[in-house]
Structures are given as C-alpha cells and as structure tokens.
Amino acid sequence: MPANLPPQFHTLWLKLKEAKDLEEKILILEEMLAICPKHKGTEKLQKDIKRRIAKLKRGEPKRQKRETLYFVKKEGAGQVVISGPANSGKSSLLNALTNANAKVAPYPFTTKIPQPAMMTYENILIQLVDTPPLSQGFSPPWLKGILKEGDALLAVFDLSKEEVNDDIKEFEEILNNWTLSEEKIIFLGNKIDLEKAKENLKKIRVPTKWAQYEIKPISCSMNWKFISHSTNLRFISCLKRIGLEELKKEIFDLLKIIRVYTKSHNQDLPDFEHPFIVRKNSRLIDLASQIHHNFTFSFKYARLFGNPPPLSVGGICPNASSPKVVGGKKPQIIGKDYILQDGDIIEIYT
C-alpha cells in the first residue's frame, strides 16, 4: 500500500475487512476513494478501489428496491434533514433532539441509510432525518433528493476540526450545484464545548454566498450565534446540550408553520394537544378544506376566540403574549379570507 495515506484511510481499510453488507462496503470504498491523495504513487490504488466499487455495484439490488430503502415518508409537522461532512455530529444531534438511539462512532459512514426520528416541540412533533456524510466524493442522487424534498435542512460542522473551513466551502459548492434554497437551512457549528473549537472560531470564514457573519454571544453560557441577513450559523454542543432548546424554536420558525385549534359548537374548549398544522399566511378556507373537503363549498363563517393560556396556567401553547381563556372575550366573526395566526382558536359554521 502506498505511503503518505491519511490515518482515516487505514481506519476505513480495517472497517472494510469487517464489513458484511454490500451497501456498507460500497460506501466505505467510495469514502476511501474520496480521501485518497491524487498523485502518481496512488494511481494503482485508485484504479483498484474503482474496480472493486464497480464489481460490488453489479451485485446490488435492483434500483427500485434501493430507492425504497432510501425513501423517508414525511410525518409530523415537517421534515428536517440533518446533513454535513463525516463525524461532524449528525447522529449525536438526532439523539440529542429526539428519543432516538442512532449509532455514534468516530469513523465515517456510521450512518449508512437515512434514519428518521420525531422531535417534540411544545405540543407538536417534527420529523428529523439523519443522513450519511455528504462530500464531493459521496453525493449520490438519492441523497440530493432527500435534501431537496425536506422542508428544512440542518447543516452540521465540527468546529474542533482543523479543516472546518474546507468542509464549509465544500458543502457550499454542493448546495450551489444542487440549487438548494439557503432560506431553508440552519448552519450549526458543533462541539463548541471543546477548547480546540474555541480556538478555531477566529479562523472560520463563512462562504460569500451567505454573506459575512458577526460572532455575537446570546447568553452568558457558551451559547453563540452568527448573525446575518440571510441565514444563521449557531454554535451548539450535542454532548453538553448547549443551544439545543433554542435550536428547537429556530427549527419551528424555519418551517414557517402555525398551529390552529378548532372546537365544535357544543365544546367549551378545543383539544390543545392536537392542533392543525398549516403554512404561515394560510387563509381560513385552507384550514376548512383540510378538515373536510366539503367545507370548501359549505363554509359560511367562523368564530375566532382568544389564544389558549400558556403552560404556566395549565394551557399548551406558550407563545401567547396576552392569553385569553376561551369564552373570556366575545369571539369575532371572520370570513374565509381571514389570515390564520399561530394559536388561533376557530369554530367553523357551515
């Protein structure tokens, strides 16, 4: 084997010998090819890796079965995909934000296929999807499809890594090629609890597409945030759980959804634990058609009640700035073009 190969290459070589699954072997070989230095001394090794990949792919299951393996059905209030380079903490983030128990290990491709889990935010569930590491050497079409179809994206980077700038730049290039909207992305700098990460903060340069960022502390703890006009780059620690509660709120805001509660004429209170989820700026008629398609034609008017009480007084939704208990104020009569707001309580008449 040629000299001057990176340590990760030898780690992957040992992992390849132990691999049993066909797909796992292909992923490991593709990662080996990506990190293998490109010079004359490694030409034979590169050809051998490519030959082995081609041979293994000939024995893969049919495409239809593979697409089913990588497809993740959307569930909950929205689907948020976790992506980033190898060993940046994607699976750790999934575990920290949900009750999942995804495998975490200090080597690439611990995650081989998309792994979904549900994150609780107040009274709703949001689906998070952990994915294999994304790089120029590994960016298959199915992974592109998952990122583009997701409602939002968390891009995770290891702040303690010397090459963190290169990782951010490479990730930007992939996003540019895939034309992913920057409006649905939150950039996360993980492992802020490590001293090496704090040292690297001075070196970090965010790509020009996302403008220049100002580093600003948002609390007395090690909870930091990049502020910019276009997007955020939050500092977090999955291990120490730094910034994770604030991140949940940012994920909810990024999805651009609202919760609406409905009640029937003979109910005193709606079910605060199971709201309807609609997009921001949705009209009342959009909600009515979601409840039942006949309401689109039979809708007459609706009554709008005050917002539910906060958690501190026995309610569910803590976002109400001046809560009014249902029935505490005379309801308003609203029409089908009313723009719904988060926490609205609606009683529909047909």
Image: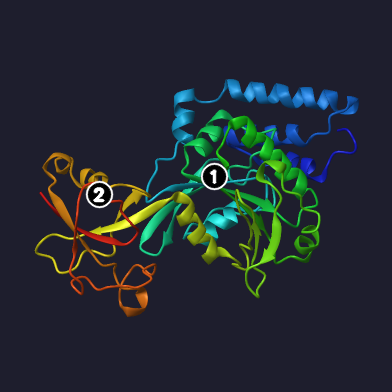
Q: Report whether 202 appears left or right of 345.
A: right
Q: Position of residue 265 (x, y in %)?
A: 10, 61
Q: Is residue 205 above or below residue 134?
A: below
For the view shown, which residue lies furthest in the bottom direction?
313
Residue closest to the eye, 291 or 40? 291
The residue at which mark 1 appears reads as 183
Q: Residue at x 20, y 75 (%)?
A: 328
Q: Is residue 304 left or right of residue 267?
A: right
What amino acid is found at the position of numbered circle 1 in the picture? Glu
Q: Earlier in the sequence, mark 1 or mark 2?
A: 1
Determine which quarter of the picture holds residue 141. top right
Percent position of residue 280, x then y: 38, 50
Q: Residues within 10 Å of mark 1 (few under 14, many from 20)?
A: few
Query: Which amino acid, mark 2?
Result: Leu
SS for dot 1: helix
Left or right? Give the position of 179 relative to 150.
Answer: right
- The residue that disc 2 covers is 284
Q: How is the image coloured?
A: rainbow
Res. 99 in view: yes
Crowd rating for badge 2 (residues with CA inside 10 Å; few <14, some 14–19, many 20+) = many
Q: CA distance from mark 1 to mark 2?
A: 26 Å
Q: Are marks 1 and 2 in contact (CB under 8 Å)?
A: no
Position in image of residue 299 (x %, y %): 14, 46
Residue in the picture at 66% in, 45% down: 210
- Total numbered circles: 2
How far across and down, in percent of the image, does residue 270 sit? 21, 64
251 lies left or right of 32 = left
Residue at (49, 51) in percent of width and height:
254
